[in-house]
Amino acid sequence: MTSKRQVPCPPYCLAVHTWGLLSKESPLKRPCHVSRGRLYSICLLAFLTSFFLALHIVFLGYPRTPLVCLDSYRGNAYNVDEEAVESMRDRVRFPRTKRRLPQCIIIGVRKCGTRALLEFLNLHPSIQKASDEVHFFDEDDKYSLGLEWYRRRMPYSFADQITIEKSPAYFITESAPARIRAMNASVKLLLIVRDPVTRLISDYAQLAANKARKDKALASFEELVLHPNGQVNTAYKAVRISMYSIFFEKWHRVFPRRQIHIVDGDDLVRDPFPEVQRIEEFLGIAHRISKENFFYNKTKGFYCVRNETTEKCLNESKGRRHPEVSEEVIHKLRQFYAPYNRMFFRAAGRDFGWPEE
């Protein structure tokens, strides 16, 4: 007869509740009883464990690590879908986080290393990056959707983290400076530049590659950048983008110089660490990115990033080969850009040493 202080234990609960009450010889044949007091104790212990674990998560949160840890692959050796990883990153939400408007924006310049710069900064635990170029301030149809739409494009972040977005088209868009100031007058801006002739050739190389993927041909570099009479074709958009002083003046009229940090894209390619250190100082965050976070990939020909768990390089569309351009054309372009470069150096308060001959 069953005791009033005991309850029968069915076979399926033996492994959970008996804690060794059965013998090894006949684990299911001999009768099993668990005292009501012990059963209540087990239930209470399970409840308290779950309760305190939930409290820890809600009030203390999860440890924060650089987001590159989500990209757990080495050179895509495991055939990881990078777009799927980025999509997962945007969906992951830790307690006490929310989507915030960016406190820092990489405004350009196209083909000067904006993607590399964003990935380098993403090593810092105090930075959260938007995965995609949003183009909110340069496209009227997106801007008309409002700041709430823009905010929802941002990643989840903690209150003490900096959200960064990059859209290189902002730099050359007439309305972008005023629109960004209307969002946040104290926003910090990152502008990355490089030798304007090198940037122009890189721009052409990307356009040619995009055309080739669609089985379309692109006119030669010389045909696009020069008129038949040998004059530089300023109607060609890629030529105008490298005239930095024209666009920088418009930003300087809207934002004080102290809110704009200019990154040397050529130095970022040669040695990213010093440039990243200067950006940490500009953003007012601790130096958490070290020289060991960068390594040179001889196969790709540029620097990649690593942390304690993984390594990551930019995809195959970066570091593509440039077309062969004659010295005569390069000389003509350098002479053309020289006066614009000098004006830019004066406004930036820094001489980048780009050749004029």
Image: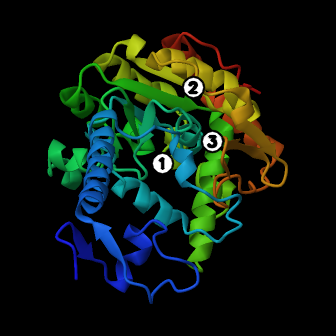
Q: Answer with left or right where residue 161 lies relative to residue 58.
A: right
> What whole-number distance in Å separates the C-alpha atoms at marks 2 and 1?
22 Å
Q: Amino acid at mark 3?
A: Arg
> Which residue is disc 3 drawn over?
199
Given contact means CB atoms under 8 Å apart, are the residues at marks 2 and 1 in contact?
Answer: no
Give coordinates of residue 26: x percent, y percent: 53, 86
Give coordinates of residue 135: x percent, y percent: 33, 49
Given contact means CB atoms under 8 Å apart, are the residues at marks 3 and 1 in contact?
Answer: no
Helix, strand or loop at disc 3?
helix
Q: Residue at x 45, y 42 (%)?
A: 168
Quarter of the picture holding the C terminus: top right
> Which residue is disc 1 drawn over?
237
Tag in front: 2 or 1: 2
The answer to whether 89 is drawn above or below residue 179 in the figure is: below
Q: Earlier in the sequence, mark 2 or mark 1?
A: 1
> Which residue is disc 2 drawn over?
263
Give coordinates of residue 347: x percent, y percent: 48, 13
The local crowd at label 2, few if under 14, some if 14 to 19, many if 20 or more residues have their Cα within 10 Å, is many
Q: Amino acid at mark 1?
A: Lys
Residue 274's quadrant in the figure?
A: top right
Q: Amino acid at mark 2?
A: Val
Q: From where the camera sits, is residue 334 visible?
A: no
Q: Residue furthest front?
A: 1
In the image shown, does 165 or 33 lie closer to the viewer? 33
Helix, strand or loop at disc 2?
strand
The local crowd at label 3, few if under 14, some if 14 to 19, many if 20 or more residues have their Cα within 10 Å, is many
Q: Residue at x 43, y 85 (%)?
A: 30
